[in-house]
Amino acid sequence: MRHSPGARVGTALRTLLLALTIALVAPAVCAVPALAGPPDPTISLADLEAKLAGGPMDGYFLTVVGGASQDPQQIPVTLLAVAPGQTLDGALILFEASGAVIDKAGGVASGMSGSPIYVDDGGVYKLAGAVAYGPEGGSTLGMAQPIEYMAAMQADFPPQSVTLTLPRPVTAAGRTLSKVTITPSRRAARRVRPDPGTMVMAPLTTVTVGGLPAASPAFRKAAARLAADGLDAVPGGTAGAGGGDFQTAFAPGVSIAGMYMTGDGWGGSFGTTTYVDGDVVVGFGHPLNGVGDAGFDLCNAFVAGVWSGLFGPEKIFAPGALAGTVTQDRSAGIAGRLDVAPLQVPITSTITFAGRTTGSHSAMPQWAIDSPDWSWYADVGPWAAMLMATRQDYLVGSASTTTEVVVSDGADDYTVTLDNLWDDDYDVISSATGDLDTVLDALTVNQDGIAAATIESVAFSADLSPVHRGARILDVSVPGGLRTGVNRVRTTILRYGDPQPRTVTTDLTIPRGMVRSGSLWVSGPGGADWSDGEDEGADSTGPQTVADIVADLRSAPRNTDLQVVYAPERPLVVPPPAVYPIAEVGASTRTTSALTGYVEKSTGAMSLRAPAVVRRGASARLRGVIYSVAGNTTVSIYRRVAGGTKYVFVAKVPAVMDDDFEARFSFRTGALKADTRFKAVWGGDEQSLGATASRLVRVAVLPR
């Protein structure tokens, strides 16, 4: 692909800037595990455990309650016990919170995770850890992450549920506990059936998806994808709430957000800052996603208040100003850097609905959109834009879309532009981003030998309508059956709201030498893989480049393309391929409807017998067999007298199926005066294509 000098200069500059950024930032990022630690006095886990042996210890944690003040408030706590862990980190700290804020909220709230806990150690308040886990539904009890683990940011937090046994039973919150089960999500916590002396706790945070109403199929789709990764999702504010200007200095107890997307469509997890060390911000007390080295956006967070939400008490957040990058997502929490500027990919959307055009803007961290685990979240931007334009939770109807993705392989920029039509009788909004999914999946999946692909921008436009523009594939036929050369394949489709089916004709060429027994498929978007993986034409050229993938995407069929594929049977003995082609052949036809469904039929087969010679003026008996039929059927008989150029219809005769699913027919001709060729034509049925067979009957003057 050729590019203008300007495009090459732009790419070169971006590559140079990125290389300089990596060179300057890499030493600082690598230094994160060796942090100097929190500036406040701390108490070691060993000292804390020894002191708790003499009884509970009083203290407080700092967190933002919200509203007019975004300053952290002190929440009284009592540290009860150290629970020796079965994790590589070692242990968690059981605590009980109290006071007016906790009473009003109904317990320790989601979003308080990361809140630094200070304990009174002989009159000196020392940093012991951070709020991390709590039971679903709300409770005054919680588990804290020891501060020494957060400073170390050890990376091997097991993702499965882990049960921690307390050194001795503890009575708190009206019950006696001997064990605490820690799960990676609240969804996982609901599946645990604990013993009476066991309390189940989960991380005190969720993924907030902004711009998608809770009742929308788009939100349910995003929540299901997050749940597959073990993450709980809750709906955030309406479109336009993300990317706010709220900004404050990070300090212990100040709210913090790790964001997957900002803008009109947004999403991420909110928690609390545990401590700040120079340009390093540490918080959460548990993993965001546990991915290790990361590149999420680090943002301020505005707290509107605390209330009882879907999973119990939770803070009501809105993302604030972009502040830096979450570079570490480890077992004991997250570490962000204020001196590492985030690299963001713009996602712009232009939506037309009911005669009005609405523009929208979101952005994703480049680290996330380039990841096969997170690129799917790019859908949230266009989803939020379409919901904002329609002002409704879902839309039954159609969408005409253009999806444009600019990608770089480090040397050149490539633009993939796909135009498509979507129709959905459930919600076209959540399905209209299918091309974006296809492009990002193809460019971000880890393929052998592929050059690194960097997504640079996404532009999406859609013309939404409540009018359906879909069609269902009903049937396929080939008049007279498949033959060598050009075949007129007739596909019957039924368009939405149309009382009469329509026929779409596609020319399919069968090369000379190809066997004419096999299967014919017609399908809508994407086609299907009808091969058994042994085609001689299979790609064996090695790894693909970004340019190769871009070329494949540009030539891929659209939802309006009717795909026709013939797959010949493989004979038991395969002659040389040059003489006997066995690879599939295909063709396509573009329609004006978004197609759904497919039809497969086997090629028909029929034989016809007749006397080779009859006496002049006598008749002949034709006998035939149709192989593999679905039931009784009919056959049309035609004749062409010697010297004629056209077949003439003679009769339609019944063909009766026997126990072997073969249909037999016979026909007595009239008096024959000249050589005549007879042709039997079967139109096919619901499982097989039609077939044609012919036989020449010669007429002679024979002695009586």
Image (cartoon, helix red, strand yellow):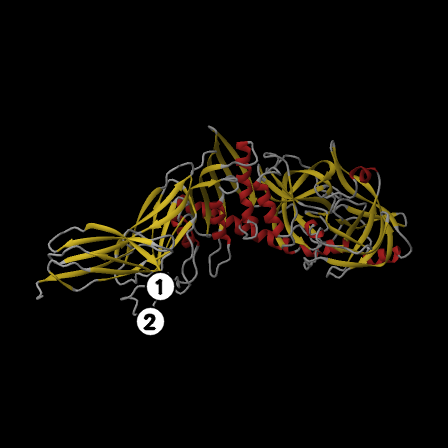
Per the image, the residue denoted by label 1 is: 569
Q: Position of residue 39 (x, y in %)?
A: 77, 49
Residue projecting furthest to the right: 54
The percent coordinates of residue 71 (x first, y second) are 76, 37
Quadrant in which residue 83 is drawn:
bottom right
Q: Along the horizontal axis of the image, is 227 left or right of 307?
A: left
- Give neighbour class at mark 2: few <14, some 14-19, many 20+ (Cα, 10 Å): few
Q: Quadrant of the C terminus?
A: bottom left
Q: Is residue 216 left or right of residue 307?
A: left
- Label 1 and label 2: CA atoms lie apart by 11 Å
Q: Residue at x 68, y 56 (%)?
A: 33
Quarter-wise, where is residue 661 in the image? bottom left
Asked if residue 314 can be seen in this view, the reply is: yes
Q: Nearer the viewer, residue 614 or 695?
A: 614
- On the image, the x and y values in percent for residue 264 come to 57, 36
Q: Residues within 10 Å of mark 1 (few under 14, many from 20)?
A: some
Give above or below for 659 relative to 438.
Answer: below
Residue 655 appears in which quarter of the rendering?
Answer: bottom left
| Residue occupied by mark 2 | 573
Q: Residue at (33%, 63%) from the top-left corner?
A: 582
Q: Toward the viewer: 265 or 45?
A: 265
Q: Could you tell me which secondary element the residue under label 2 belongs to? A: loop
Q: Amino acid at mark 1?
A: Glu
Badge number at residue 624: none
Image location of residue 53, percent across then percent down: 89, 57
For badge 2, the amino acid type reads: Val
Q: Nearer the viewer, residue 325 or 402?
A: 402
Residue lying at the far front in this picture: please name it.
704
